[in-house]
Image (spheres, grey):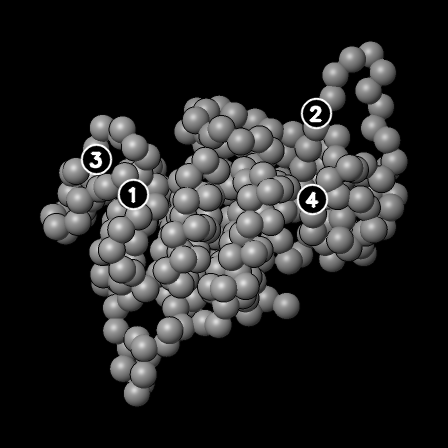
Amino acid sequence: MGTLFEKGLEMQPKLAVVGAAGRMGRRIVALAVESKQFEIVGATDAKGHPDIGKDVGLLAGAGTLGVPLTDSCAGRSDVVVDFSTPEAAGNTLRYCTENRIPLVMGTTGLSRDQQAILSESAAKIPLLYGTNMSVGMNVLFALVGKAAAMLGPDYDIEIVEQHHRFKKDAPSGSAMTLAEKICQSTGRDFPDCLTHGRQGKDALRQANTIGMHAVRAGDIVGVHSVICSTLGETVTFNHTAHSRDTLVRGALRAAKWLVGKDPGLYSMADVLGIK
């Protein structure tokens, strides 16, 4: 690793995209081409996908690239970006670990076992995992825990996340990260302190819990709100993604940053220099 930057000569990293035919994958391909900072050398998606064999550049609206969509990881790249499904994540982790290829993993909804495998892989390759790659969201990750600690236990905390009707996992990975950051700063047990929605005639909130609510509607890209409220006032932190492109640009920034790094588990906070 590090050969791309020897003697101060920066070259275009060779990029492979997993989940390349999906909504996020197509935008990763399109913006990588638009940036002129990467060379697309591989694109994969699930077996049986109707677009297998088609030029991934045409699928992404980025023109002909001469790179067909395949159903398996192949070829040699300098970095892989995965925005696919939890079911596919294991194959990506195994492929990148065996071939010592840096990996940006943006797939959410991973099980605890998969997260453990992810950590094991990071001992062998540079691996960046993030539930949300946008710069603004990662600033919010850094702020919410500090704010909750400053406000203190008298403030009830509720997290509301909104996404499009096609999103499978709930709550979102970003909402869970927000809750985890708050728990780390306030001494709450994560994830045991979470209350997922409320119903019934006796649904009073319990002290030191965090309410978690998931909305699935239309084509909402992503809205996350952290409500901190006590008797007399409310403080609300909010992040709204206007398009998937903000997530894609963050992922590409992470991919460029990760090439040449030592093995380890990294985050967007490392990319952005957030302490």
Between 69 and 273, which is closer to the camera in this rendering?
69
Please identify the quadrant where the C terminus is shown.
Answer: bottom right
Residue underneath mark 3: 52
Q: Disc 1 designates what residue?
A: 72
Which residue is located at x 75 percent, y 30 percent?
195
The Cα–Cα distance between marks 3 and 4, rounded to whole angstroms, is 38 Å
Q: Position of residue 169 (x, y in %)?
A: 53, 31
Q: Check disc 4: other Cα within 10 Å, few if <14, some if 14-19, many if 20+.
A: many
Task: State how far apart marks 2 and 1 are (Cα).
Answer: 39 Å
Q: Where is residue 82 in the image (x, y as percent from the top left)?
A: 40, 48
Q: Which amino acid does label 4 sit on?
A: Ala
Q: Where is residue 193 in the image (x, y as percent from the top left)?
A: 79, 37
Residue linked to disc 4: 179
Are the residues tagged 4 and 1 within 8 Å (C-beta)? no
Q: Nearer the viewer, mark 4 or mark 1?
A: 1
The quadrant of the picture occupied by the N terminus is bottom left
The CA span between labels 3 and 2 is 40 Å
Residues marked 3 and 4 touching at CB (< 8 Å): no
- Mark 1 residue type: Ser
Instruction: Point out residue 71 in the picture as x, y percentages from the top left corner.
Output: 27, 39
Q: Are marks 2 and 1 in contact (CB under 8 Å)?
A: no
Residues at badges 3 and 1 in contact (C-beta under 8 Å)?
no
Label 4 to label 2: alpha-carbon separation: 14 Å
- Residue at the (75%, 43%) spot, across then down: 190
Q: Which of marks 3 and 4 is in front?
A: 3
Mark earlier in primary sequence (4, 1): 1
Q: In terms of secondary structure, where does tag 2 sit?
A: loop
